[in-house]
Image (cartoon, rainbow, N blue to C red):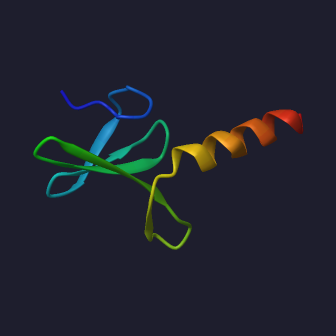
Amino acid sequence: MIVCPLCQKGSIGKVGNNQYYCWECYVEFSIKEDKVIIYEVCDDGTLLVYDKEHNELLTTIGNLKR
């Protein structure tokens, strides 16, 4: 069973050849041999390579605003 490389949950859908979507954290990822690439899905449907440091900063800022 395939699990999300970010949240480790199994709510995964297949969107293409070796491409998957996580319904829990809303990222796409591709698996090629032993390499996993994670993408953020933009509002217009384009994919950006996931930037862990940027997202951790946004989460921290969001928590400070509460």
Q: Quadrant of the C terminus?
A: top right
Task: From the viewer's perspective, tell me whether residue 16 is left or right of residue 46.
Answer: left
Farthest residue to the front: give it. Answer: 53
Task: From the viewer's perspective, tell me whether residue 30 is left or right of residue 45.
Answer: left
Farthest residue to the left: give it. Answer: 33
Rendered image quadrant of residue 49:
bottom left
Q: Residue at x 22, y 32 (%)?
A: 2
Task: From the viewer's perspective, tell me whether residue 55 is left or right of residue 22.
Answer: right
Task: From the viewer's perspective, tell me whether residue 56 is left or right of residue 17.
Answer: right
Up-down relation of residue 47 to residue 9 (above or below):
below
Residue 33 screen position, x and y as percent: 10, 45
Residue 27 screen position, x and y as percent: 43, 48
Q: Quadrant of the N terminus?
A: top left
Residue 10 screen position, x and y as percent: 32, 28
Residue 40 screen position, x and y as percent: 47, 56
**Towards the viewer: 48 or 35:** 35
**Towards the viewer: 56 or 23:** 56
Q: Residue at x 21, y 45 (%)?
A: 35
Up-down relation of residue 19 to residue 48 (above or below):
above
Q: Residue at x 75, y 36 (%)?
A: 60
Q: How many marks?
A: 0
Q: Residue at x 46, y 52 (%)?
A: 50
